[in-house]
Amino acid sequence: MGHIKGIIFDFGGTLDSGGDHWSHVIHDAWTAAGITTDYPTFRAAYIHGERNITPLVIPSDNMLTLLTKKISLELLHAFGDDSRAQEIASLCYSHARECISHVLPPLEALADKFPMVIVSNFYGNLRSVLADYGMTHLFRGVIDSAESGVRKPDPAIFRLGLDMLGTEPGETLVVGDSIDKDILPALSLGCPTAIVTGRQWDDMPLPQLPDGCVQFRSIASLADHILEVGCER
């Protein structure tokens, strides 16, 4: 990675949940709030919320507001009652803020050395989410799929990130949490890649890493490696 000149980061699942798929964060919050149900019921509710949330989101929504709307959809789908949505959303939001607190220092160290952008499948409010987390200053720009009209795994969304950075694929590191949505499309453009992973969707094992992808346990360990390699050049 000693030749990189810019970095593209995914957001959801990569920076705000410690590499865990967000279904685990929300399911943990359901459990902490005393809502127990079989996993197929939760899974169906999660998918319903994900598929129906975008029209309800406005650009000024921060993560807490977004989560409240999404979890309301989930609870209505599962139980016909969303009275616990704010409580569960608050638990998820607190968890996300804790995760963000851990990634901010290494991101700030990287931002001192490299231009960085966010490329994320999101809901049209990612800039408000980043501002609420105090992260906006770290990134040259943001590509939000709901605004761009292009979604991962289409490599075109990563080309938008490259254009924003003004770097070539071979000198741009792409960091994400999904082999299919982040790593493979970025590799198809010729970008080196890194994956930060925790619990996967449906607790599936992580697929075999393709050539050109390196796994890290955290953003902090990734930053340490990049900065160490950079110092050795």
Image (cartoon, rainbow, N blue to C red):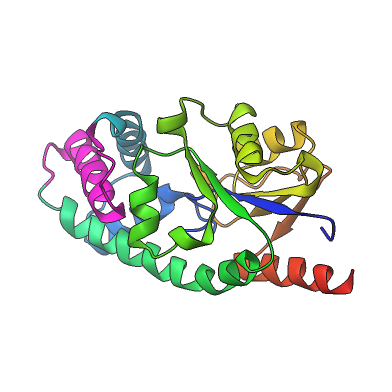
Q: Position of residue 50 (x, y in %)?
A: 35, 35
On screen, residue 26 versus residue 14, left or right, reads left
Residue 163 position by quadrant:
top right
Task: Tell which residue pokes out farthest to the right in this image.
Answer: 233
Residue 217 position by quadrant:
bottom right
Q: Which corner quadrant holds the C terminus?
A: bottom right
From what the image shows, is residue 189 above or below residue 133?
above
Residue 59 in magenta stretch: yes
Question: Which residue is nearer to you in this view: 186 or 198?
Answer: 186
- At x 68%, y 41%, the residue is 183
- At x 61%, y 64%, the residue is 111
Question: Which residue is nearer to you in this view: 52 or 125?
Answer: 125
Main secondary structure type of the part rendered in magenta: helix
On screen, residue 78 versus residue 111, left or right, reads left
Residue 122 in magenta stretch: no
Residue 57 position by quadrant:
top left
Q: Position of residue 94 (x, y in %)?
A: 32, 66
* Residue 82 visible, this orientation: yes
Q: Which residues are drawn in magenta?
A: 56-82
* Residue 218 visible, this orientation: no
From what the image shows, is residue 32 above or below residue 157?
below
- At x 75%, y 32%, the residue is 189
Q: Position of residue 194 (x, y in %)?
A: 71, 52
Q: Which corner quadrant holds the N terminus?
A: bottom right
Q: Position of residue 30 (x, y in %)?
A: 27, 55
On screen, residue 23 versus residue 37, left or right, reads right
Question: Which residue is nearer to you in this view: 153 or 171?
Answer: 171
- At x 37%, y 66%, the residue is 97
From what the image shows, is residue 195 above or below residue 57?
below
